[in-house]
Image (tube, rainbow, N blue to C red):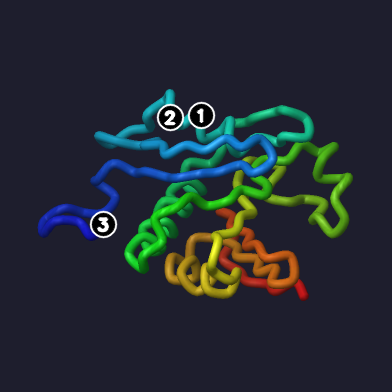
């Protein structure tokens, strides 16, 4: 997982591994390679991160995919090679409005947020990894056993 000497991490192909429990969809995707988005795999990542209640997808923020990629690289370094289990990616206004406690101007509405869990790890453990990147918001939901990452401003909150 660590780059060879002289190779920058971000110059290597960027791969993510996603799983949607509700639909049983799973994919390992190289969404970025050779300095550009791999359109087919990027579009499939957007599909996996769609609003499954409305079956609607949008173009997800590539920086969010980079944040997932970097987090998964650290998880792999520490021995976890499986997917992240997606709870929510993009949310339509209708879906967002129907969720108790969802922010009215949620980053999910703009394709800039993901909620997920990793089997065997607590949301706090994942948050400690993600915080190293200083790349956006981190919401920690220990009672519901998931973490929120977004590409908005750098901030952290814990929902008890």
Residue contact at pointers 2 and 3, CB within 8 angstroms: no
Q: Quadrant of residue 103?
A: bottom right
Determine whether the residue tagged by mark 2 lies in a helix, strand or loop: helix
Q: Decide if residue 51 is on the left or right side of residue 96.
A: left
> Picture coordinates of residue 66 (x, y %)?
43, 49
> Picture coordinates of residue 50 (x, y %)?
65, 35
Residue contact at pointers 2 and 1, CB within 8 angstroms: yes
Q: Earlier in the sequence, mark 2 or mark 3?
A: 3
Q: Which residue position is annotated with label 2?
A: 41
Estimate the spatial distance between the alpha carbons at disc 2 and disc 1, rounded to whole Å.
5 Å
Q: Which residue position is annotated with label 1?
A: 44
> Picture coordinates of residue 86 (x, y %)?
61, 48
- The front one of 135 and 56 is 56
Image quarter of the N terminus: bottom left
Q: Earlier in the sequence, mark 3 or mark 1?
A: 3
- The front one of 119 and 7 is 119
- The front one of 18 and 97 is 18
Identify the residue at the far top of this view: 40
Image quarter of the C terminus: bottom right
Residue contact at pointers 3 and 1, CB within 8 angstroms: no
> Picture coordinates of residue 147 (x, y %)?
62, 62
Q: Decide if residue 22 is on the left or right side of residue 15.
A: right
Q: Which residue position is annotated with label 3?
A: 1
Residue under the image location 69 percent in, 40 percent down: 22
Determine whether the residue tagged by mark 1 lies in a helix, strand or loop: helix
Residue under the image location 78 percent in, 30 percent down: 54
Residue under the image location 29 percent in, 41 percent down: 13
Q: Decide if residue 157 is on the left or right side of residue 53.
A: left
């Amino acid at each position: 997982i660590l780059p060879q000497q002289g190779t920058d991490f971000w110059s290597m192909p960027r791969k993510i591994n996603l799983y949607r429990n509700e639909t049983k969809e799973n994919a390992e995707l190289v969404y970025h390679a050779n300095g550009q988005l791999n359109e087919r795999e990027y579009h499939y990542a957007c599909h996996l991160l769609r609003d499954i209640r409305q079956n609607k997808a949008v173009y997800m923020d590539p920086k969010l995919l980079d944040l997932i990629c970097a987090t998964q690289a650290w998880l792999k370094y520490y021995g976890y090679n499986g997917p992240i289990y997606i709870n929510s990616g993009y949310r339509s206004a209708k879906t967002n409005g129907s969720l108790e406690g969802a922010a009215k101007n949620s980053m999910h509405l703009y394709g800039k947020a993901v909620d997920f869990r990793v089997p065997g790890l607590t949301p706090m453990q994942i948050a400690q990894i993600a915080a190293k990147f200083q790349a956006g918001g981190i919401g920690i939901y220990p009672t519901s056993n998931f973490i929120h990452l977004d590409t908005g401003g750098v901030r952290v909150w814990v929902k008890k």
